[in-house]
Image (cartoon, rainbow, N blue to C red):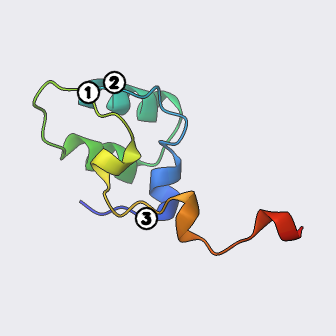
Amino acid sequence: MYWTLELASYLEDAPWPATKDELIDFAIRSGAPLEVVENLQELEDDGQPYENIEEIWPDYPSKDDFFFNEDEY
């Protein structure tokens, strides 16, 4: 399983919190690439919903990771 910013971006609008099956369904319905669906299928399924993308990909960059000062523009 591997994630990139491009692949993870397909899950930004997912209905969080969501179970593994709900995320797979969302990815298929939204037209996400096959790699996204395959990555989701490899997740462990303990029946508990995922609260956000960070629970799936802990290294997902947050807004704070970018050094862009919105006040300057």
Label 2 and label 3: CA atoms lie apart by: 21 Å
Q: Of all residues shown, which one is farthest toward the right?
A: 73
Label 1 and label 2: CA atoms lie apart by: 9 Å
Looking at the picture, which amino acid does disc 2 mark? Answer: Glu
Q: Report the number of discs.
A: 3
Which residue is disc 1 drawn over?
Answer: 49
Looking at the picture, which amino acid does disc 3 mark? Answer: Thr
- In front: mark 1 or mark 2? 1
**Residue 68 at x, y = what percent?**
70, 72
| Image side of residue 19 versus residue 13, left or right | left
**Residue 28 at x, y = what percent?**
43, 32
Looking at the picture, which amino acid does disc 1 mark? Answer: Pro
**Mark sitting on residue 22:** 2
Label 3 and label 1: CA atoms lie apart by: 22 Å
| Image side of residue 33 versus residue 18, left or right | right
Location of the N terminus by quadrant is bottom left
**Mark sitting on residue 4:** 3
Say above or below: 58 vs 31: below
| Image side of residue 61 versus residue 68, left or right | left
Q: Residue at x 29, y 46 (%)?
A: 55
Q: Please rate how many residues cluster around mark 3, counting C-alpha atoms within 10 Å: few if below 14, some from 14 to 19, many from 20.
A: few
Q: Nearer the viewer, residue 71 or 43?
A: 71
**Residue 60 at x, y = what percent?**
41, 60
> Is tag 1's residue or tag 2's residue first in the polypeptide sequence?
2
Image marks 1 and 2: residues in contact by CB distance under 8 Å: yes
> Is tag 2's residue or tag 3's residue first in the polypeptide sequence?
3
> Is tag 3's residue or tag 1's residue first in the polypeptide sequence?
3
